[in-house]
Image: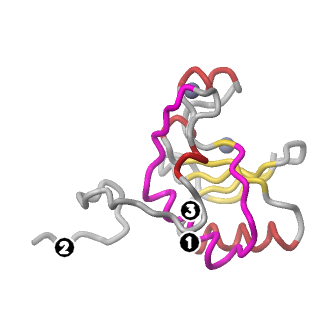
Amino acid sequence: MINAPETNKGGAGPAAATAYIHFRLEEFACECGCGANGMDPRFLAKLDRLRSVYYQRPLTVSSGYRCPVREAAVGGSGANHPLGVAADLIVPKGAALRDFVAGAFAVGIRRVIVYHDKPHTHVDDNPALPEGIFVK
Ligand SMILES: [Zn+2]
Ligand SMILES: [Zn+2]
């Protein structure tokens, strides 16, 4: 038996028949209507825990998985949403955002991007990108 870290990416555990408490997987499907949904279940489990424990308010998903066509259409970098490790969520500014950001890091999400001119907050778990909170 190998001594595997429990939260390591690339773990060999079977994808659990995943039931999220606060989300339905369909909420993260590509918004172009193509039906693609390549969300990483480990990332979704973090979001679910964030919602359950740290951010005890409704969360609306404005974008989850994006197929390459959709990613190009919205001018995305291609580095996050098409990999299934990113989501855009509607989080009000103020105390709610504070709880959300603190919770995101507490559950192990690597990056949070808050936009001045967009209603959503982006979170992602891409290990290839810098960790932290960014304001754009
Ligand atoms: Zn699509
Ligand atoms: Zn995003």
Viewer-nearest residue: 135 or 115: 115
Q: Earlier in the sequence, mark 2 or mark 3?
A: 2
| CB atoms of marks 2 and 3 within 8 Å | no
- Residue 118 location, x and y as percent? 85, 43
- Which residue position is annotated with label 1? 49
Q: CA distance from mark 2 to mark 3?
A: 23 Å
Q: Earlier in the sequence, mark 1 or mark 3?
A: 1
- Which residue position is annotated with label 3? 109
Kindly tell me whether mark 1's CB lies below 8 Å from ligand 2: no
Whether 106 is among the magenta residues is: no
Q: Where the C terminus falls, by quadrant? A: top right
Kindly tell me whether mark 3's CB lies below 8 Å from ligand 2: no
- Which residue position is annotated with label 2? 3
Q: CA distance from mark 1 to mark 2?
A: 25 Å
Q: Amino acid at mark 1?
A: Arg
- Residue 27 location, x and y as percent? 61, 47
Q: Residue at x 59, y 59 (%)?
A: 23
Q: Is residue 66 left or right of residue 19?
A: right
Q: Amino acid at mark 2?
A: Asn
Q: Earlier in the sequence, mark 1 or mark 2?
A: 2
Q: Which residues are magenta?
A: 34-62
Which image quarter has ligand 2? Answer: top right
Sort mark 3 into few (<14), some (14-19) or many (20+) by Cα contacts within 10 Å. Answer: many
Q: Is residue 40 above or below residue 97?
A: above
Kindly tell me whether mark 2's CB lies below 8 Å from ligand 2: no
Numbered disc 2: secondary structure = loop
Q: Residue at x 90, y 42 (%)?
A: 117
Q: Residue at x 9, y 72 (%)?
A: 1
Foreground: disc 1 or disc 3:
1
Q: CA distance from mark 1 to mark 3?
A: 11 Å
